[in-house]
Every structure is written in C-alpha cells, then in structure tokens.
Amino acid sequence: MRAAVVVLVAAGLLCAACGEQREVASHPVGHVPAQDPIPARDPLPAEIRLSGGGVLTAAAPKATAIVYDAALAPPGASVQVTAESGSVFAVTTATVSGFLPGRTYGAHLHVDPCGKKPAAAGPHFRRPGDAGHSHSGAGHGPGAKTGHSDPGAGHGHDGAGASAATEFWLDFTTDANGAATATSRQDWAFTPAHRPRSLVVHAEPTTTSGPDAGAAGARVACVTLVPS
C-alpha cells in the first residue's frame, strides 16, 4: 500500500512539472514572440560601364566616332574608349592609333554625345558639385550649360575649378606609329544621372593651371559613349 502511494505522488509531481513547462512555453492568444532583428545589408555598389569608338569617320546623323580635323587625325585613325565607375571611384582609358606620330594631344570627357559640329559634345564632364561657370556659346542666362568649354571650339571660356582632380584629362603623346594609351582615375563616381556622354580629342595639350586651365585648343575628334 505504501509503495502505491509513493508511485501516485511521484506521478503527480511529474504531471505538475509538465504543466509548468507548458505554461512557460505558451503565449497569450494574439501574442507574437519577439524575433531577433534582421541585420541591415550594405547597399550594392553602383556600377556603370561605358564604351565607344572605332575608326573615325566624317560627321553623319548616326556616326559615333567622328573626325573634325583630318590633318591631325588622318584617314584610318581610330579611338577606343572605356569608362567604368564603381560606388566611390571611376576609371577611363583611351587608346588611339593612326594619329600623327610623336605628337601630344589633349583629351577630355564631355557632357553630351558627339554631333555634326565640334561644339555638340558640350563642356567638359566634371565631378558633381564642380560644374564651374563656363558656357557653350549660348550665353550665361537660364538654360545655359555649365562646365568647361574650349576656345578652339568657338565657346566662351572660364577655367575656374578645372583641374585634373575635377575633370577626366586623358592627354596622350603618340609613338612613331601614331598610337598611344592614356588612363585617368578619380576618387569620385559616375551616377546614372551624372555620367559622361563622349570623349573629345583636342589639338593641343591641356593647360593645367591659370585662368585657361582645362583648355586644349580645337576639337579634333569625338567618340560617343554608351552603356556597355
């Protein structure tokens, strides 16, 4: 009889313990258990790739590699350009062939695509926030383009803010075969709304300081850049 009582007491304690465990694990109706917060993810890096080029041809409605001065970029001359941007820096490389041998040319990224006239590419492409105050021959009133423009292209000129840190300068000196490669890297990036549309080759080396900083003479050739 005593043994039976002990068994019953033990069974009762065990059931009580089970009840306590169920009570701890249960939640009121409608209650959602707290969850660990999902860690925030870093934004994906911006990535923009542009390219353009080919053998230079006379200006035409759909031409994207145009020669304006065949004396400085003879028939058969070509330009290839790549421009790539991550989230914090951008790199541009230009490779030319068939130009005059042993000669230095200026070259810069510009804000607009190439066109029939040398002025179509607009002013130099600049770092965001460094648009400058020059114009593209249309005056300084509302709607006038900002940036840096070239005296040799028939534009007004203001070198304020122009430098190798705020613009992409890709001057090159050709070898005995008229070939060269130039690369420019900046610690700032393109964005979909702020990216270059062309590379222009100029007749002279880029002026690096003073009120004419950024000037490089007449526009010899132009390559339109498109996403690639």
Image: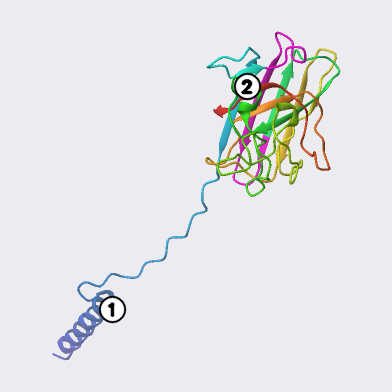
Q: Residue at x 78, y 23 (%)?
A: 203
Q: Is residue 129 above or below residue 78?
A: below
Q: Nearer the viewer, mark 2 or mark 1?
A: 2
Dividing the picture into quadrants, the one containing residue 82 is: top right
Q: Is residue 214 above or below residue 38?
A: above
Q: Is residue 221 left or right of residue 63?
A: right
Q: Is residue 52 magenta?
A: no
Dividing the picture into quadrants, the one containing residue 151 is: top right
Query: How many residues crowd mark 2 within 10 Å: few (<14), some (14–19), many (20+)?
Result: few
Q: Is residue 203 left or right of residue 28?
A: right
Query: How many residues crowd mark 1 within 10 Å: few (<14), some (14–19), many (20+)?
Result: few
Say what amino acid the circle numbered 2 marks: Lys
* Image coordinates for residue 16, horizontal then vertical, percent: 22, 83
Residue 24's disc is 1
* Image coordinates for residue 1, horizontal then vertical, percent: 13, 90
* Image coordinates for residue 87, horizontal then vertical, percent: 59, 45
Viewer-proximal residue among 160 and 78 = 160
Is disc 1 placed on a helix, strand or loop? helix
Viewer-proximal residue among 103 and 175 = 103
Viewer-proximal residue among 57 and 191 = 57
Say what amino acid the circle numbered 1 marks: Val
Task: Calculate the distance from the C-alpha at mark 2 to the C-alpha at mark 1.
Answer: 81 Å
Viewer-proximal residue among 37 and 58 = 58
Is disc 2 placed on a helix, strand or loop? loop
Q: Is residue 123 left or right of residue 36?
A: right
Q: How many marks overall? A: 2
Q: Is residue 125 above or below residue 228?
A: below
Which residue bears the numbered disc 2? Answer: 117
Q: Residue at x 71, y 27 (%)?
A: 153
| Image: magenta residue range | 68-91
